[in-house]
Amino acid sequence: MTIQRVHVIGSGLIGSSLGLALSRRGVHVTLEDISSTNAALARDLGAGALSEPLDTPDVVVAATPPDVTAGIVAGALDRWPSAVVTDVASVKGSIVRALEQRGGGSGDLRRYCGSHPMAGRERSGAIAARADLFEGRPWVVTPTDATAADALATVQELARLVGSAVTVLDPASHDAAVAAVSHVPQVVASLAAARLRDLPEEAVGLAGQGLRDVTRIAASDPGLWTQILAANPRAVRDELKAFSGDLEAVIGALGQLGDGDDAPGARGILATTIANGNAGHARIPGKHGAAPTQYGVVRVLIPDEPGQLGRLFQDVGDTGTNIEEFIIDHGLGGQFGVGEVFVVPAAAEGLAEALQRKGWTLHA
């Protein structure tokens, strides 16, 4: 089928971004939210219309917090008896169990197929929405044994319409996977950032890009993440217990070294921990979901002045080199930043030479 009408319930970051993305592709999107102000803002930003769908929508999307999603899905199944209904919550097992417990009150579960776009931002609400939020990102579709084949195909089409790469998992496998790749990293980032609360200012002032990378997602919404963690407790607990075992091994090794003796085996534990991290990091998908790629890095000193970053990008573009990734780190007390320009390895040396000829200072 071709999706022409989508009704989105919930106008936060994901719901509004979905509305923006679908509207750009010519899909008629209507919006609904418990807050009329939130819905009106999403409309004003171009995410869709506020009116109730004149006809039955092809798809209804529940873009609501996890603790109310099951009820929203059940209501949508009843309100639109021929529509396919999906949700975009980051947990699935608890929603499926709640729908199954509702039985006949939840409409026809053959028309329900859960899903989860693996995309987001630290900011929340419609004001943070982006039409390109889902492009190149994984979108997990989680059919149950009751899901009809056409409902599965429709939700897959929805995900592809907004540029996502579709993966199909059963709800339990999904919850175990996101516990490892999303939920536990959030907890670890929050714990690491929490250690900064009482750190002296001069110590915090030494923070570099490494700390920013590790703690970036610690700025996430506490209320939403409490719901997410509470809805996936077993899988998150199991991952954290394994993490705790690895951490205890490191603590034990450091304790042996701190005692001042030779500490046989302690250094091996530390080295193995870092090496295992290297191996795990190397498995993270690369650009556009492709296999991981090792890039060459050209580090450039960028004056902290208007127009300098744009000038750098222009100069890189003039060489015919594509920037694969870019990171900027501002030096402590210096009016400059160090820009890391990631390019394919074969282009790194030539780019470095070209930038030097254009007057840029490189950082070793």
Image (cartoon, rainbow, N blue to C red):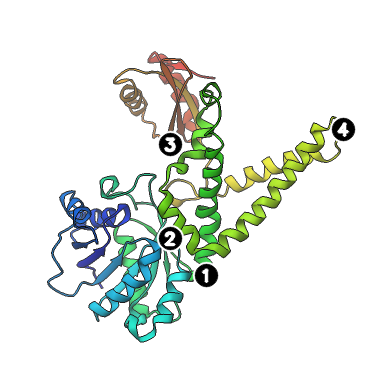
Tell me which numbered mark, 2 or 4, is placed earlier along the sequence: 2
- Give the left or right position of residue 238, taking residue 147 as reference: right
Q: CA distance from mark 1 to mark 4?
A: 46 Å
Of the image marks 1 and 3, the number of the one nearer the N terminus: 1
Q: Which mark is residue 217?
A: none
Callout 4, which amino acid? Answer: Asp
On screen, residue 18 versus residue 40, left or right, reads right
Number of marks present in the image shown: 4
Residue in the picture at 32% in, 22% down: 311
Q: Which residue is mark 3?
A: 325
Question: Rounded to the nearest whole Å, what is the CA distance between mark 2 and mark 4?
Answer: 47 Å
Circle 3 packing at 10 Å, graded few (<14), some (14-19), many (20+), is: few
Q: Amino acid at mark 2?
A: Ser
Identify residue type, mark 3. Answer: Glu
- What is the C-alpha distance between the residues marked 2 and 3? 27 Å
**Residue 218 image point, x, y percent:** 47, 43
Identity of the residue drawn at 21% across and 63% down: 32
Look at mark 2 in the image and give the residue it sits on: 90
Residue 262 - label: 4
Quadrant of the frame with the N terminus: bottom left
Residue under label 1:
172
Viewer-side label of 1, 3 = 1
Question: Is 248 placed above or below 48 here?
Answer: above
